[in-house]
Amino acid sequence: MATRLKPVDAVTIGVGLTGSLAGLELTGAGLTVVGLERGAPRDTVPDFQSPSIHDELRFSIRKAMMQDNVRVAVTFRNTSDQTALPIRRWESFLPGQGLGGSFVHWNGQSFRAQVADFIYRTHHLERYGRKFLDACGPDLTIQDWGVTYDELEPHYDRFEYLIGVSGTAGNIKGKILPGGNPFEAPRSRNYPNPAQKEPYFGAIFRKGAESLGYRPYPQPSSNLSRPYTNPLGLKMEACVFCGFCERYACEHYAKGSPQTTILPILLKNPKYELRTGCEVLRINLDSTGKKATGVT
């Protein structure tokens, strides 16, 4: 028999990066929150430690960090008149499962969107004119987001300092700076950590690009270049260049994963409860069908 549990103020379906951040914000506002994660609990110690975390057959080939698409059906179709069929092998799309979600096995690339990305329709209208959009036909349905880069910039900044992004700023408050991306949207301040050390192959590429008049820059990365304490008081360590990043968890506390940047604080909050191994089957709605009242 299904059991009706004690009501709480909010429930997150999944406890990856988004669910962790939502839990942090909601409990910070005084709400009681339950995080439901269908995968298993896992932490840097003992789950992400070598040598087992460096098992290339398990993680690179068999993709153990991802949803098990033999057991969890995810279907796909190219057009609406096709029959959606199950995806049986993951390739570039790597949905995570388990505590921390995809931000456990992500590679740490930490780019911001550009100003034009938020006003995509307006940007194209101003640059190319309405005839250009009309010529593309009715299938082109691009729209502006309804929120601008300037409105989101403080949140980008807060997020970067939370997960400890390493990089070199190219545009601070409209001032173009040497060594960074000259085309990036303006940021209010520099990255919390300097860019990663330049490897030999990177130096060769940089010198070649500079000789052709280009302005290469180090990729912003959530793999830390130095020890760092984030605004929540959680300590992170410097990347040791082990080479096991994408598709793997970080054993060194050096990657901006929920386990290193959010969860140790969130899980201590008495207003938050984590429940793993919980598969949400349905979001329950009220009589209007418009308001969520709970989950099954």
Image (spheres, rainbow, N blue to C red):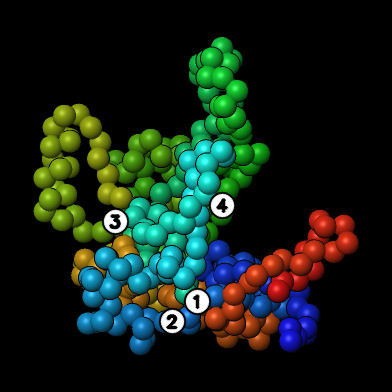
Query: Closer to the camera: disc 1 or disc 3?
Result: 1
Q: Disc 1 on helix, strand or loop?
A: loop
Query: Closer to the camera: disc 2 or disc 1?
Result: 1
Cα distance, mark 2 to mark 4? 31 Å
Labels 2 and 1 touching (C-beta < 8 A): yes
In-front residue for pair 25/92 = 92
- Describe residue 177's horizontal placement relative to residue 150 as left or right: left
Between discs 2 and 4, the one toward the N terminus: 2
Task: Tell me the number on the disc at residue 154.
Answer: 4
Query: Closer to the camera: disc 2 or disc 4?
Result: 2
Q: Which residue is mark 3?
A: 195
User: Residue 27 occupies which quadrant of the picture?
Assistant: bottom right
User: Residue 235 occupies which quadrant of the picture?
Assistant: bottom left
Q: Position of residue 247 (x, y in %)?
A: 32, 65
Position of residue 198 relative to residue 59, above or below, is above
Q: Disc 2 on helix, strand or loop?
A: loop
In-front residue for pair 100/74 = 74
Q: Residues within 10 Å of mark 1 (few under 14, many from 20)?
A: many
Q: Which residue is mark 1?
A: 39
Q: Position of residue 146 (x, y in %)?
A: 66, 39
Position of residue 97 relative to residue 161, above or below, is below
Q: Residues within 10 Å of mark 4 (few under 14, many from 20)?
A: few
Cα distance, mark 1 to mark 3? 34 Å
